């Protein structure tokens, strides 16, 4: 499972949890403006926007999971197994292999509107990066400071949806996720009133009772409701530490603890990492399952006119500050 969210204070923040049972060896990766981006069916891009995000680098190619570009546009791929269908190469379309989609969009689009336009010309193909690396079955959230969209490629082709809450999880398809929010419209951050019956004297015996019924389990449908509720009610200061801290709290509402989601192979799904990118400033913050301290990589501290990928392996070791040392 995975969850993605957007958040706006003074700056625009974009991030996700990556929930899985194993890691592909991902690293925070900066693609500078002059790295030659190759595409299977389209001309190489020798000059493009710089990108920072989490990627598995294979043969010097950044296979991004989630990233933002220097214009403040963010994009993340989340599992959409059983629903994602990619097409064959089609003439008259811009054919983009599924693993190229994040680079293709973020290298040239300044905002979600431009991404929407470009997506109208795209055919996503199931072409593999290499034979031994099967493609994920994904859908995507693309967002800038003004709006978010969801992109799903299914049996009926490519669909783009307005994503008003600015959140995404996994199955079912996005329109169904949005529809089920109707079931929860009575939930509130305020205390409830007794509408049950005026013949009974019912009491609010605890704080937080306005959200009674908010689903607490780890299914993607439940995480969708929970993260939407949390994000839409979240309040924080405008500063960087306040905003970043608050963002990690939002995604903390859907975090997976080892042991709670058992898979057939006896393994457990966990939140491998959580990211929060200040998309306005190009700073990628992250925590990992084992390292709860927030670590950051700032793209503007790198030579963004370079030609080579810049890679930072995640710091996985728990960092504990002994206060009375
Ligand atoms: C498995 C990851 C998604 C996690 C997720 O959504 N889990 C939910 C499980 S479930 O639905 O609820 O069951 C996805 C997200 C990004 C994916 C990776 C990125 O797309 C980058 C490359 C792309 C290559 O084509 C395949 C390997 C890969 C390295 C992908 C492996 C895997 O599919 C990743 C890591």
Image: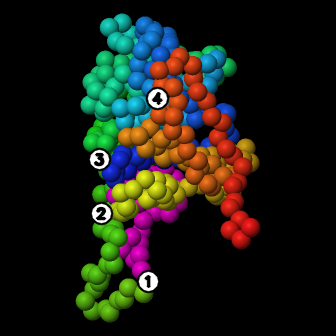
Measure the C-alpha gap from mark 1 to mark 4: 46 Å
Number of the front mark, 4 or 3: 4
Q: Verify CB contact (< 8 Å) between mark 1 and mark 3.
A: no
The residues tagged by marks 4 and 3 sit, at their Cα atoms, a distance apart of 25 Å
Residue 76 highlighted magenta (yes or no): no
Residue 183 falls left or right of residue 325: left
> Regarding mark 2 in the picture, which secondary structure is present there?
loop
CA separation in Å, label 2 and label 1? 21 Å
- Give how far across and how far down residue 314 sits, in percent: 64, 40
Q: Of marks 2 and 1, which one's residue comes earlier in the chain?
A: 2
User: Which numbered disc covers residue 206?
Assistant: 1
For image coordinates 41% across by 19% down, the residue present is 48
Judge the density around disc 1: few (<14), some (14-19), many (≥20) Cα neighbours within 10 Å. Answer: few
Residue at mark 4: C-beta within 8 A of ligand 1:
no
First along the sequence among labels 4 and 2: 4
Residue in the picture at 35% in, 70% down = 189
Tell which circle, 3 or 2, labels the residue nearer the N-terminal end: 3
Q: Which numbered tag is attached to residue 164?
A: 3
Give the Cα distance between marks 3 and 2: 15 Å
Which residue is located at x 33 percent, y 69 percent? 188
Residue 148 circle label:
none
- Where residue 51 is drawn, which disc sits there? 4
**Label 4 SS:** strand
């Amino acid at each position: 499972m995975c969850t993605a969210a957007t958040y706006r204070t003074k700056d625009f923040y974009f991030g996700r949890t990556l929930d899985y049972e194993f890691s592909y060896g991902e690293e925070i990766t900066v693609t500078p403006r002059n790295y030659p981006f190759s595409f299977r069916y389209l001309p190489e891009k020798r000059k493009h926007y710089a990108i920072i995000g989490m990627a598995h680098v294979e043969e010097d190619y950044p296979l991004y999971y989630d990233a933002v570009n220097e214009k403040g546009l963010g994009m993340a791929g989340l599992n959409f197994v059983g629903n994602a269908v990619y097409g064959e190469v089609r003439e008259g379309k811009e054919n983009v292999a599924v693993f190229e989609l994040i680079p293709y969009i973020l290298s040239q689009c300044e905002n979600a509107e431009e991404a929407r336009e470009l997506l109208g010309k795209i055919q996503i193909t199931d072409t593999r990066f290499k034979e031994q690396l099967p493609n994920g079955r994904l859908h995507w959230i693309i967002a800038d400071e003004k709006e978010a969209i969801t992109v799903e490629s299914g049996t009926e082709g490519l669909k783009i949806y307005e994503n008003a809450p600015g959140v995404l999880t996994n199955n079912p398809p996005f329109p169904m996720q949005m529809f089920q929010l109707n079931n929860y419209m009575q939930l509130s951050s305020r205390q409830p009133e007794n509408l049950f019956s005026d013949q009974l004297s019912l009491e609010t015996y605890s704080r937080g009772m306005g959200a009674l019924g908010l689903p607490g389990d780890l299914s993607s449908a439940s995480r969708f409701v929970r993260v939407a509720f949390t994000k839409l009610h979240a309040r924080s200061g405008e500063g960087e530490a306040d905003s970043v801290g608050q963002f990690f709290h939002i995604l903390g509402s859907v975090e997976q603890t080892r042991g709670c989601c058992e898979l057939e192979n006896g393994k457990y799904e966990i939140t491998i990492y959580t990211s929060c990118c200040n998309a306005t400033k190009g700073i990628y913050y992250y925590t990992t399952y084992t390292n709860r301290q927030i670590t950051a990589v700032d793209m503007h501290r790198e030579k963004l006119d370079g030609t080579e990928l810049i890679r930072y392996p995640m710091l996985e070791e728990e960092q504990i500050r002994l206060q009375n040392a």
